[in-house]
Image (cartoon, grey):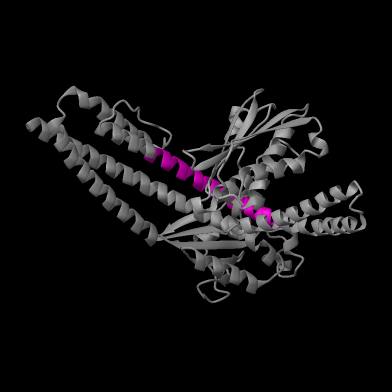
Amino acid sequence: MELTLWTAVVMTAILGGYAWFSLRLQRSWMLEEVRRGLLLASDTLNNGLRYGMQENRPEEILASIQRVARETHIHRIRIIGHGGQHILSTSGEEKGERLNPGSPGCIICHSSAGTVTPASALGASALTVLDGNTLRAFKPVPSEPGCFTGGCHAQDVRCGVLGLIELSLDLDVVEESMARRERQLGALALAASIIGGCALWFALSRRFRKPLRELLAGIRRISAGDLEYRIPLRRRDELGEVAESFNSMGGQLAAAQRGLIQSERLISMGKLAAGVAHEINNPLTGILSYGEALLEDTDPTDPRHKGCEIVVRESLRCREIVRKLLDFARQKPSERANVRPEDLIQRSIDVIVRTADFRNIRVEQSVEEDLPQLHVDPVQIQQVLLNLLVNAQQAMPQGGTISVQAARSDGGRRVVFAVKDQGIGIPEEIRTRVFEPFFTTKEGKSSGLGLAVCLGIVQQHGGSIEVESGVGKGTTFRVSLPVAEAPGNSAD
């Protein structure tokens, strides 16, 4: 009893110290993340306001910063001239008021009285200052040739820095979140101490020591940031269930972390995709118009009539893809319908087999019989399959065989598409980056958006996409999608 009591006391002390240390680290980490996010917001805002600044549109700039302030926790955004005067502010301050010479907004450019830091030395520098319970970020706005043509900065033509963008964030929300976590972690630590004391009463034999040590090691590894760590499953009793649940939690945390990182990348990719889609619309309209005219002028018995039909049909599909890409960039819901997996594969192959790039490529199909239907946007999923087929062809410049397969998985709840090539393969060091927006190994031949768009489409449909590859052994992409609910799985 005494040993158990003393062990419980020691465990309580250890858990309390660990909780305190974790909270200190977490507070420091959260403040650093908030600081980093505020600096990122200042960079984004600087880039977003560049056009309005160069065109001297103060009303448009004010509306933009007011919108940003409304949609975020940033409670004040100010634009300050290089002389320290307030130009625009979301808090209604008097226009023309000046900063104090010793304020952080001044010292970022003026290291001392009368000394100005050159713009070349500032680079992309920014400054954050913790003022009481408010975090303030100052981002210098460097001068550019386009800043002086509008006349609003003609008198500042020799200035290296035209002014600052200041963002102020109230940390009350962060403090409230930290206080809530402190209470939760304190409650968890107390509960763990009580449970540990009771468990020790029954666990004085050696058979419980190793599982508890492994569990504690797993907690430490996860807390240290190793979200891929898994506890070995050696038992089928309660401790084994705890280890299995712990491993499941680690997997979910790792997936959530990867999802957050990918979401940030897809936001940037979506902005570029929207601009590209707008540019594609104009030439695509011309192609479609001429294709329809050729189709009308070609006799149905003419061998070229089928080719004209393909041109018109694929042009219409391209226009639909462009529209869907714009909807995807704006995060609008896709237009879904029940469709057979084999139809998606066949349509995709029909599009590419007649192209010149596939003259030395053989495409094989292997589709499991009686596959359930998928409730998806057929245009978007066909876009994914086409992209994977084109990537497979480009990986085999000397020709070869592409295998396209579809089969059930996860007890019939999902359908997995597999596109396998016999190409050069993907090196291990870059395999984890292939889905990053703008990452490409085909310099000058690709924008690096294809697989990033595919990932976004598949995730939007509740699916996943994985890659297996070895240098010189080919590459396999697997796309897993949930099947349609039972009432929609009947044949058309």
For image coordinates 50% across by 48% down, the residue present is 260
Inspect the magenta stretch and tell me whether residue 253 lies in it.
Answer: yes
Q: Main secondary structure of the magenta part?
A: helix
Please indicate whether residue 469 sits to the left or right of residue 414 in the image: right
State which quarter of the image contains the N terminus: top left
User: Is 294 on the left-hand or right-hand side of 280?
Assistant: right
Q: Magenta region: which residues?
A: 249-275
Q: How many marks?
A: 0
Residue 128 inside the magenta-drawn segment: no
- Give the answer, above or below, for where 334 lies relative to 404: below
Residue 278: horizontal and vertical position, in percent? Answer: 73, 59
Depth check: give the residue in front, 355 or 234: 355
Q: Position of residue 21 (x, y in %)?
A: 30, 42
Q: Is residue 210 left or right of residue 94?
A: left
The answer to whether one can see residue 296 in this image is yes
Give above or below for 74 relative to 206: below
Identity of the residue furthest to the left in this view = 1
